[in-house]
Amino acid sequence: MGAGVVLALVTGVTLVLFRLGVESNIPGFNPLLKFFADASGDWLKLFVISAGTATVALSAAGGLLSRYVPWLRAPLDAALDVDNHFREFPRRAIPRARIFSRFVAVLNCIAAQSYDHIIIVAHSQGTVISTELLRYMKERTTHGQAEQAMDPVASLWERLGGRIALVTAGCPLRQLYAARFPVLYEWVLGQHGPNLGPVADDVGVLRWVNLYATGDYVGRWLWSRAPHGEYPVTQIDQAGAHGDTYTPHRVDTTHWKTLMGANTEKDISIGAGAHTHYFSIDQKTMAGVIDALLAS
């Protein structure tokens, strides 16, 4: 640990203790601590307000940006999605928590039905929301300390009964989230045998199919062979299966067994395209994958 990090930690702890009423015995030190404690609070408040104002301004200006600088709209949308996902304020209306609560309400409704199979189809930022919620529900049920009968989340997970398959498209988990937030998304780059990537069991699903277009600027493949040499793990252009990552994959969607083989995870390239055409009327691969998983 560097000296700068240690100094920052000591300073932070000292300021927190002073705010809690723990004073120093060093003569003349307490007024100095009070000054920096008050100043740090003002600086933090200014930073939060400035960041929030900038975010609101950029969101409100989206229409103008699309008209006059359309090349900026796509990266700005991605940045705002990430900001919204990690935002912790206001405490009573955290965006991520509100989204998760709606998602859980839908899952509660689905769990009350007698469906044999449940297919969750997610696109773009929705893939991050879906995988994080499913992973949380699975981990809470598996490692929860409370009685599961008293825990609504664990009870819901049990009622879903291992019936879920997941289809993701334009998924930014690897190329964006794992690349920029490697500690939070370390599980996305886990190594399992010769392959690198998440596994279906990480998020508690039976099967996980990921579709990507070769020109998708938000997210593409999830699985690759383990890295060799100097290449970063998030930039390897090698799929887990043999073949060119950028060539459309031929898949047999007659049944999930012909689609998946012995695997529980599968990347499928749909060929040339960007981020918004996975559900076009002529996109037969997506429809075939969903039909195959329903035929389980």
Image (cartoon, grey):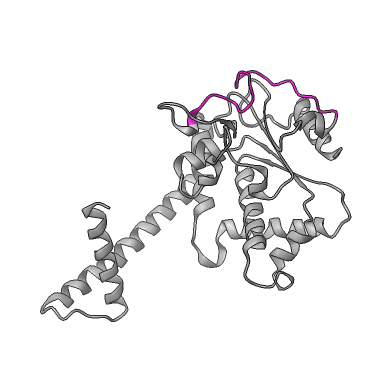
Question: Residue lying farthest left?
Answer: 27
Between 247 and 69, which is closer to the camera in this rendering? 247
Relative side of 154 to 87, left or right = right
Residue 281 is situated, as x and y percent measured from the top left of the image, at 78, 28
Residue 255 is situated, as x and y percent measured from the top left of the image, at 84, 32
Whether 2 is drawn above or below 61: the answer is below
Q: Residue at x 34, y 60 (%)?
A: 46
Quadrant in the rendering for residue 207: top right
- Magenta stretch: dominant secondary structure: loop
Tell me the quadrant of the picture where the C terminus can be found: top right
Q: Residue at x 60, y 46 (%)?
A: 128
Q: Residue at x 21, y 54 (%)?
A: 3
Between 216 and 161, which is closer to the camera in this rendering? 161
Question: Residue lying farthest right?
Answer: 114
Quadrant in the rendering for residue 155: bottom right
Relative side of 280 to 181, left or right = right
Between 150 and 110, which is closer to the camera in this rendering? 150
Q: Is residue 42 magenta?
A: no
Residue 25 is situated, as x and y percent measured from the top left of the image, at 16, 81
Q: Residue at x 73, y 59 (%)?
A: 157
Label total for image: 0
Quadrant in the rendering for residue 229: top left
Residue 32 shows up from this direction: yes
Relative side of 181 to 25, left or right = right
Residue 60 shows up from this direction: no
Numbered range of the magenta stretch:
235-254
